[in-house]
Image (spheres, rainbow, N blue to C red):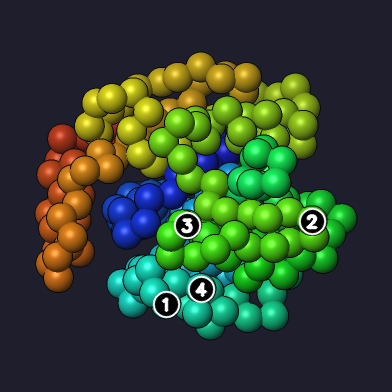
Amino acid sequence: MKKILNLDGGGVRVYLFLLILNYIEKKTNKKIVDCFDYFYSVSAGAIILAGLLTNYSIDDMILLVKNTNIDNLHHMIDIFFNKMKLNDIKKPFGILTYDINTRKYITFHSYDNTNYNLCDVLKATTSLAPYYKEYNIDNYKLIDGYSYDIDLNVFASNDVIKYFGNNDYYQLYIGRIITNNMYDMIYKIYKTGIVHMIEIDNNIIINDTNSFDTMDKIFEIWLSNNIEYINNICNNI
């Protein structure tokens, strides 16, 4: 069985995703990169997975998130991923962007026969107007692939099937709400089969100096309410 992790974007809210991933690591006694066979992400989530796939720890990524804001985001990408290539990542990893020229979503893969700088791809998937203009790679004019009208699992499922072919899959999604219920624990069916969902409400984070303390408390409440669900996920990966 192939195990897939889809990590959505969401700015500072990826801190909550890191708390969830940290719980999974401790419960399974395995690194996240060893729990899954394929990784797919977008925007700030792509930074997190790129870090974990290049031997940074979850604590390192928490430090990155806590010290990053919209003004220094691309500078922090340079600091953490300087001189790395996307194909330096040895596990299959897809990063979603959007090309404003063709009005199509473009995925960059670690396993493509290319030599893209990892910094460039991460800057492209986090180039959110009006803070950053489109980011040029080849003939593409790329912006943040994170959008409220897409379902990241659709893109991931298509790529996974192209990469692995017909197979049995265990797929986990962590990200924004797709089903209109806060912290909805559901199973949705895609081309790869069932996707196990952990969804976080986009509106729960207040933008103040205590936002990380707020998210710590939110995570504790979420964990106490969903301990059986998350433990079942841990048992399956």
Residue located beneath label 2 in the image: 139
Q: Give neighbour class at mark 2: few <14, some 14-19, many 20+ (Cα, 10 Å).
A: few
Can you give x and y, in whole percent of width and height, for residue 108 in the image?
71, 51
Instruction: Look at discs 3 and 1 and give the one toward the viewer.
Output: 3
Residue located beneath label 1 in the image: 72
Can you give x and y, in whole percent of width and height, for residue 111 in the image?
78, 52
Q: Give neighbour class at mark 4: few <14, some 14-19, many 20+ (Cα, 10 Å).
A: some
The Cα–Cα distance between marks 1 and 2, rounded to whole angstroms, is 26 Å
Question: Mark 3 or mark 2, which has the lower sequence index?
Answer: 3
In the image, what residue type sits under mark 3?
A: Leu
The disc label shown at residue 128, or none: 3
In the image, what residue type sits under mark 4?
A: His
Locate the N terminus by quadrant.
Answer: top right
Residue at the spot x=53%, y=52% of the render?
144
In the image, what residue type sits under mark 1?
A: Asn
Residue at the spot x=87%, y=55% of the render?
113
Residue at the spot x=62%, y=19% of the render?
191
* 30 displayed left or right of 156: left
Instruction: Look at discs 3 and 4 and give the one toward the viewer.
Output: 3
The Cα–Cα distance between marks 3 and 1, rounded to whole angstroms, is 13 Å
Marks 1 and 3: in contact by CB < 8 Å?
Answer: no
Q: Give neighbour class at mark 1: few <14, some 14-19, many 20+ (Cα, 10 Å).
A: few
The disc label shown at residue 74, or none: 4
Can you give x and y, in whole percent of width and height, for residue 97 in the image?
61, 49
Instruction: Look at discs 4 and 2 and give the one toward the viewer.
Output: 2
